[in-house]
Image (cartoon, grey):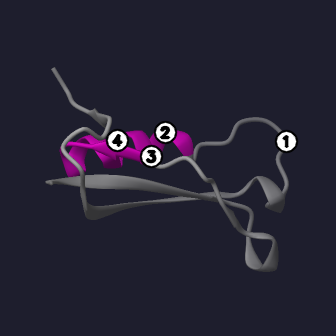
Amino acid sequence: MIQVFALILYIGIGEERKQVEEVLYFDTVTYCNDVAKEVVKRWGHWTHKDQATAYCLPITVPDDALVYRLK
């Protein structure tokens, strides 16, 4: 088991808020936060249903889990 940071993404606000099923794992919180900052950006005309919120949470995953690492 290894300790990583999971990027959890939510789309929408209030009762309409839904968690995106796919979770990405990163080796450092800095890398996770950098990706989180980019995935919540919205350009052009958007509505509240397009609102995105991202969290980086420390979790433990199996050794064979796909973990994104900076080179």
Q: Residue at x 35, y 54 (%)?
A: 6
Residue picked out by circle 1: 45
Is 34 colored magenta in this rendering?
yes
Q: Where is residue 52 in the image (x, y as percent from the top left)?
A: 63, 56
Q: Which residue is pictured at 80% across the width and 79% down the height?
A: 15
To which residue does mark 2 refer?
Answer: 38
Which badge, 1 or 3, is on the more N-terminal residue? 3
* Local crowd size for mark 1, using a 10 Å CA cut-off: few (<14), some (14–19), many (≥20): few
Q: Is mark 1 on a helix, strand or loop?
A: loop
| Residue tagged 3 | 37
Horizontal side, residue 19 vs residue 60: left or right: right
Q: What element carries label 4?
A: helix
Q: Do the residues labelled 2 and 4 touch (CB within 8 Å)?
A: yes
Whether the residues at callouts 2 and 3 have beta carbons within 8 Å, the answer is yes
Whole-angstrom CA distance, mark 2 to mark 3, is 4 Å
Q: Which of marks 1 and 2 is nearer the N terminus?
A: 2
Instruction: Give the quadrant of residue 45.
Output: top right
Relative to 16, residue 68 above or below: above
| 3D distance between C-alphas at marks 1 and 2 | 17 Å
| C-alpha distance separating marks 2 and 4 | 7 Å
Q: Residues within 10 Å of mark 2 (few under 14, many from 20)?
A: few
Magenta-drawn segment: 24-39
The correct choice, above or below, for 14 with respect to 67 in the image is: below
Give the mark, 1 or 4, whose residue is nearer the N terminus.
4
Whether label 3 touches label 4, CB < 8 Å: yes
Position of the N terminus by quadrant: bottom left
Q: What residue type is labelled 3?
A: Lys
Determine whether, in the image, residue 19 is placed left or right of residue 61: right
Observer-side mark, 1 or 2, equals 2
The quarter of the image holding the C terminus is top left
